[in-house]
Image (cartoon, grey):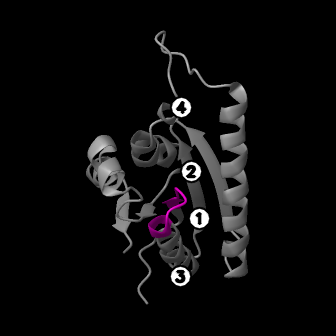
Amino acid sequence: MLKQGYKVILVPVDGSKTSEKALLTGIEIAKRNDAHLDILNVIDLKQFSVSFNGMIDANGDVVYQTFEDVEKYLGQLKKQVEKKGLKDVDIHVRFGSPRNVIARDFPADHKTDLIVMGPTGLNPVERVLVGVISDYVIRTASCDVMIAR
């Protein structure tokens, strides 16, 4: 199999089946290329209610619990990746706009060569309201992007 030369691969996950299928593809590419794999979840604070003054109007415990839940989920994914024979893997949780963090911020910070993601983790109504993150990443990322179906 031809090696593309990818050394740092990012797989953003959101708990959806499509993102977990993309992770399987990312694992195989990382193994073939002896690459590092980053698994990322971006917590969008817009999901919490916002008061009139623009501050998050949620109990701080809600945000902390969300972070803890995401970290636990990512830890489980990391164990699954390691069981598949890939040891060079890190998990990351970021706060912010998933579109911007996945397309620009994280790859710049970690020198990502390839982003592997599912076509979307959103249902049709959410796609209309939020926009398709994968479309944005394809258009704006400075590295290669693979959509795993």
Between the residue at mark 2 and the residue at mark 3, the CA separation in whole angstroms equals 24 Å
At label 4, the amino acid type is Phe
Marking on residue 112? none
- Secondary structure, mark 4, is loop
Query: From mark 1 to mark 4, how far is it between C-alphas?
Result: 30 Å
**SS type, badge 2:** strand
Residue 142 visible in the current orientation: no
Q: Amino acid at mark 1?
A: Leu
Cα–Cα span, label 3 and label 1: 12 Å
Residue position for label 2: 41
Q: Nearer the viewer, residue 61 or 20?
A: 61
**What residue is pinned by disc 3?**
32
Residue at the (65%, 34%) spot, across then down? 63
* Occupied quadrant, residue 56: top right
Side of 74 relative to 124 (left or right) = right
Name the mark on residue 48.
4
Decide: few, some or many residues near mark 3? Use Cα within 10 Å; few <14, some 14-19, many ≥20: some
Give above or below for 120 relative to 86: above
| Percent position of residue 130, x then y | 33, 42
